[in-house]
Amino acid sequence: MSLEENGHASLLRDLLKLGRTFSYRRYRIDIAGFFTAWVAVGAFIAFYNWMSTW
């Protein structure tokens, strides 16, 4: 099995052909990183909002 089949495919590189090639298994690392980044951004916003109320 290639790395792409194990979740290491790149969403940005394959953007134009996602309609044909998308599967969670192929892009799971990119998807997990995307949601992890949004959780981190939300945590920073919540923290700074909490700090501003002091």
Image (tube, helix red, strand yellow):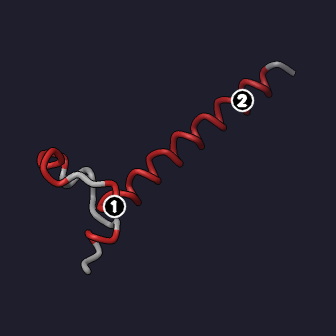
Residue 33, numbered circle? none
Q: What's the residue type where badge 1 is placed?
A: Arg
**Whole-percent x, y for residue 22 in the image:** 23, 51
Location of residue 4 with respect to 16 vertically, above or below: below
Residue bearing the label numbered 2: 48
Q: CA distance from mark 1 to mark 2?
A: 35 Å
In the image, 47 versus 2, the foreground residue is 2
Relative to residue 44, is residue 50 drawn left or right? right
Q: Quadrant of the N terminus?
A: bottom left
Residue 19 appears in which quarter of the rendering? top left
Q: Secondary structure at mark 2?
A: helix
Q: Are marks 1 and 2 in contact (CB under 8 Å)?
A: no
Give the number of the mark in front: 1 or 2: 1
Q: Quadrant of the C terminus?
A: top right
In the image, 28 versus 46, the foreground residue is 28
Q: Secondary structure at mark 1?
A: helix
Residue bearing the label numbered 1: 25
Q: Residues within 10 Å of mark 2 (few under 14, many from 20)?
A: few
Residue 13 appears in which quarter of the rendering? bottom left
